[in-house]
Image: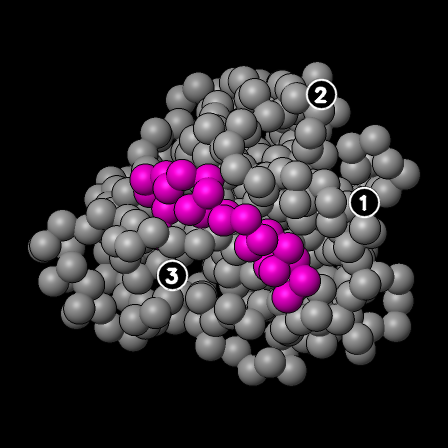
């Protein structure tokens, strides 16, 4: 396992992080004991970063139980403060003002709830889950996080960028106020490589790359007749490509298999870490089989530079599938009422958020 220094600290963090959104059954139903075993399994393989969130339903609770029954060194725990919603606006597609998303006192309440749920005295990294660029100069969220840091309840401060709004974080990255940035990085959206990640390198800000596999779509698991259970995060995600276009673009990536990667999943993972500014790749690993495949892929390191640049130039697809989730039209809402059961598929189905 390769490790990367965290910001200006002695912490050496694994190049792959356990993304804990999958622990809340967003990607299928699993027994809690099996999920705890999956966490232990990845820790056994050298993964030492777990990324969770107050908004991920039971995720923090399951992580807390896994840590309590873990006999090894405690991993680096990253969580996220939960945002509040305005009437008719959850704040993910269109921003709420900072004092609506994070009213005074809400950060402290969120962090203290996370500490209790995780059964920890301190959290290594607390991230603002719903960061919009204008929040840099708005609200009390930063001062509350700094107070919590002085009290020893958190050790480091970070942000998690809303969907694909990479450049909105440039100002706060350069301010010296944060230690980490979490943002989307994948074959279809390499824009973070252009400006955000170089800025993070210059400011020694740790980069947590998420959606490496684009909710599993970049593994090649998606077919025209693939169906998901209602409540599965992916049930209405891939329709906004549209799905036929998504599948066609994934098929084009098969030209790199097996010469440059054994699978599409490996190609996507190694692509994301090919830029030296990516500190760790955050991927759901709640299924041991897929965790093993992902860890094996990370161990192979970056793609050859010429292949990385070729994919970066020729396979970007600047779509926003979250738009359909935020603002579904009437036909999409009607179609989603008819989603059927999850179809069993072969290949790597690992997911992340």
User: Could you give the CA–CA distance between mark 3 and mark 1, rounded to whole angstroms?
Assistant: 37 Å
In front here: 226 or 124? 124
Quarter location, residue 318: top left
Q: What element carries label 2?
A: helix
User: Could you give the CA–CA distance between mark 2 and mark 3, rounded to whole angstroms?
Assistant: 34 Å
Q: Is residue 290 left or right of residue 280?
A: left
Q: Is residue 302 left or right of residue 100?
A: right
Going from N to C along the chain, the mark reached first, 3 or 1, is 1
Circle nearer the viewer, 2 or 3? 2
Going from N to C along the chain, the mark reached first, 2 or 3, is 2
In front here: 80 or 311? 80
Q: Is mark 3 on a helix, strand or loop?
A: helix
| Residue hosting label 3 | 233
| Residue hosting label 2 | 203
Residue at (17, 70) in percent of width and height: 338
Q: Residues within 10 Å of mark 1 (few under 14, many from 20)?
A: few
| Residue 195 visible, this angle | yes
Residue at (68, 62) in percent of width and height: 112
Residue at (53, 27) in percent of width and height: 137
| Residue hosting label 1 | 150
227 is higher (above) or lower (below) than 249: below
Marking on residue 341: none
In the image, residue 44 lies at what x, y percent?
80, 64
Q: Residues within 10 Å of mark 3 (few under 14, many from 20)?
A: some
Q: Is mark 1 on a helix, strand or loop?
A: helix
User: Could you give the CA–CA distance between mark 2 and mark 1, rounded to whole angstroms?
Assistant: 22 Å
Q: How crowded is mark 2: few (under 14 residues within 10 Å), some or many (20 or more)?
A: some
Going from N to C along the chain, the mark reached first, 2 or 1, is 1
In the image, residue 124 lies at what x, y percent?
77, 51
Q: Give the range drawn in magenta.
A: 90-113
């Amino acid at each position: 396992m390769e490790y990367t220094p965290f910001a200006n600290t002695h912490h050496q963090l694994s190049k792959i992080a356990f993304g804990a959104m999958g622990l809340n059954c967003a990607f299928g139903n699993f027994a809690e004991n099996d999920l705890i075993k999956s966490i232990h399994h990845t820790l056994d393989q050298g993964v030492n970063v777990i990324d969770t969130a107050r908004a991920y339903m039971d995720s923090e609770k399951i992580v807390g139980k896994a840590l309590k029954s873990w006999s090894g060194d405690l991993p680096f725990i990253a969580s996220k403060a939960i945002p509040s919603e305005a009437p008719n606006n959850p704040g993910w597609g269109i921003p709420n003002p900072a004092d609506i998303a994070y009213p005074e006192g809400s950060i402290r309440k969120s962090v203290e709830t996370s500490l209790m749920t995780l059964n920890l005295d301190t959290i290594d990294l607390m991230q603002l889950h719903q960061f919009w660029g204008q929040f840099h100069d708005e609200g009390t969220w930063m001062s509350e996080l700094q107070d919590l840091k002085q009290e020893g309840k958190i050790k480091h401060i970070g942000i998690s960028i809303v969907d694909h709004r990479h450049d909105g974080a440039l100002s706060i990255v350069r301010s010296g106020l944060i230690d980490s940035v979490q943002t989307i990085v994948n074959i279809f959206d390499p824009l973070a490589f252009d400006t955000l990640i170089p800025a993070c390198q210059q400011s020694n800000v740790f980069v947590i790359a998420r959606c490496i596999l684009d909710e599993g779509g970049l593994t090649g698991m998606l077919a025209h007749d693939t169906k998901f259970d209602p409540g599965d995060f992916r049930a209405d995600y891939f329709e906004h490509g549209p799905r036929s276009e998504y599948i066609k673009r994934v098929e084009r990536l098969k030209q790199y298999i097996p010469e440059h990667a054994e699978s599409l999943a490996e190609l996507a993972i190694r692509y994301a870490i090919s830029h030296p500014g990516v500190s760790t790749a955050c991927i759901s690993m709640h299924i041991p089989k897929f965790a093993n495949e992902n860890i094996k892929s990370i161990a192979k390191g970056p793609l050859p530079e010429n292949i990385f640049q070729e994919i970066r130039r020729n396979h970007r697809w600047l779509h926003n599938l979250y738009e359909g989730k935020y603002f579904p039209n009437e036909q999409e809402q009607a179609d989603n009422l008819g989603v059927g059961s999850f179809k069993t598929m072969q290949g790597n189905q690992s997911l992340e958020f």
